[in-house]
Amino acid sequence: MAEESEASASEAAALAPEWRIAVAVDESEESMYALEWCLRNVVSEKAQRTIILIYARPPPPVYTSLDGTGVMFGDDVITIMEKYSRELAESVKERSKKVYEDYPNVKVEMKVGTGDARDVICELLEKVGADLLVIGSHGYGFVKRTLLGSVSDYCARNAKCPVLIVKRPAS
């Protein structure tokens, strides 16, 4: 009897449509914890799942041609800032890979957008047709959240799919 229910459950999982789960990642430990938590608790080995990592690269700074002393910025400063942004995105990709490499049955894609993280995440969710967003929380208090804004709160209010906010336990 138990074998029958296990067999029918795995058959149902195999026939279920593929889920596209988006996980917002950045440089923080909270986002890596959310990815790890998602893989352990949301992803089933029997069902088809695609994890879409969403990374919002910060927008390029608005440059004036003069710094505070009246000296003109050279192209090298802009080039260095752009290189740093690319390296940061690559670093996030590599850190994420270390988390999901133990899950060979999960298909993983990465989407990178540039701009405010709140807007980038919500826009990319729609573009990729995500069924669920998993996002970490820094656990800011009321005042910090009010002053700085919370990406997870914004996404919970504005995303067109369900949002699962993962809070990292206090260590």
Image: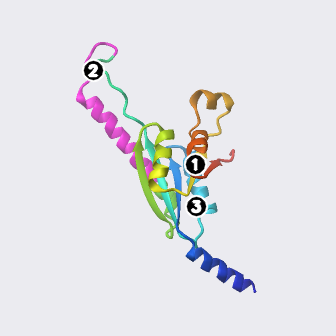
Exactly how many numbered labels are in the figure? 3
Is 38 left, or right, of 54 in this rendering? right
Q: Which residue bears the numbered disc 1?
A: 135
The residue range painted magenta reads: 68-95
On the image, the x and y values in percent for residue 130 come to 51, 56
Dot 1 and dot 2 residues touching (CB under 8 Å): no
What's the CA distance linking mark 1 and mark 3?
Answer: 13 Å
The answer to whether 93 appears left or right of 63 in the picture is: right
Query: Does the CB distance between marks 2 and 3 fall below 8 Å?
Result: no
Query: Overall secondary structure of the magenta stretch?
Result: helix
- Write down the residue under mark 3: 39
| Mark 2 residue element | loop
Circle 2 residue: 65
Q: Secondary structure at mark 1?
A: strand
Q: Nearer the viewer, residue 62 or 95?
A: 62
For residue 94, the mark is: none
Q: Residue 103 at what x, y percent from top left?
A: 52, 66
Question: Of marks 1 and 2, which one's residue comes earlier in the chain?
Answer: 2
Q: CA distance from mark 1 to mark 2?
A: 38 Å
Residue plotted at (53% across, 43% down): 28
Q: Is residue 2 magenta?
A: no
Pointer 1 and pointer 3: residues touching (CB < 8 Å)?
A: no
